[in-house]
Amino acid sequence: MATTIKVSAELRDRINQDASDRGVTAAGLIENLLDAYERRQRMEAFGRAFRGAESGYWDEFHAWDVALGDGLADA
């Protein structure tokens, strides 16, 4: 299903030029840009959560890291 959005002529021209440069449609360009933006948002949220982990998490992480390596020959 297609729909129309109102954008300035300048923005329309930029979208069309960038899409042409990449060999995709205007819709494809917008979808790719939005996908990348949403992924970046998820990764930033993950990074914030990871940096905010409590010390108990890191203690358990280290214990599992050591346990998983026990008895394995170096590859």
Image (tube, helix red, strand yellow):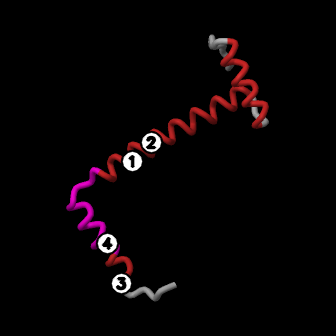
Q: Name the residue carrying label 2.
A: 42
Q: Name the residue carrying label 3.
A: 70
Secondary structure beneath dot 1 equals: helix
Secondary structure beneath dot 3 equals: loop
Residue 40 magenta: no
Q: Name the residue carrying label 4.
A: 64
Q: Residue at (73%, 19%) from the top-left corner?
A: 13
Q: Is residue 74 above or below residue 15?
A: below
Q: Earlier in the sequence, mark 4 or mark 1?
A: 1
Is residue 52 found left or right of 6 in the rendered image? left
Residue 29: x percent and y percent?
A: 68, 31
Task: Find the magenta span and give its range.
Answer: 52-65
Residue 55: x percent and y percent?
A: 21, 60
Q: Gap between marks 4 and 1, in whole Å? A: 21 Å
Q: Residue at (63%, 11%) from the top-left corner?
A: 6
Q: Residue at (32%, 48%) from the top-left corner?
A: 49
Q: Gap between marks 1 and 3, in whole Å? A: 29 Å
Disc 1 packing (10 Å; few <14; some 14–19; many ≥20): few
Q: Residue type at mark 2: give it.
A: Arg
Secondary structure beneath dot 4 equals: helix
Instruction: Give the foreground label among 4 and 1.
Output: 1
Q: Name the residue carrying label 1.
A: 46
Q: Gap between marks 3 and 4, in whole Å? A: 10 Å
Q: Gap between marks 4 and 2, in whole Å? A: 26 Å
Q: Earlier in the sequence, mark 3 or mark 2?
A: 2
Q: Gap between marks 2 and 1, in whole Å? A: 6 Å
Q: Is residue 44 above or below residue 64?
A: above
Question: Which residue is nearer to you in this view: 70 or 49?
Answer: 49
Q: Gap between marks 3 and 2, in whole Å? A: 33 Å
The kind of secondary structure the magenta stretch mainly shows is: helix
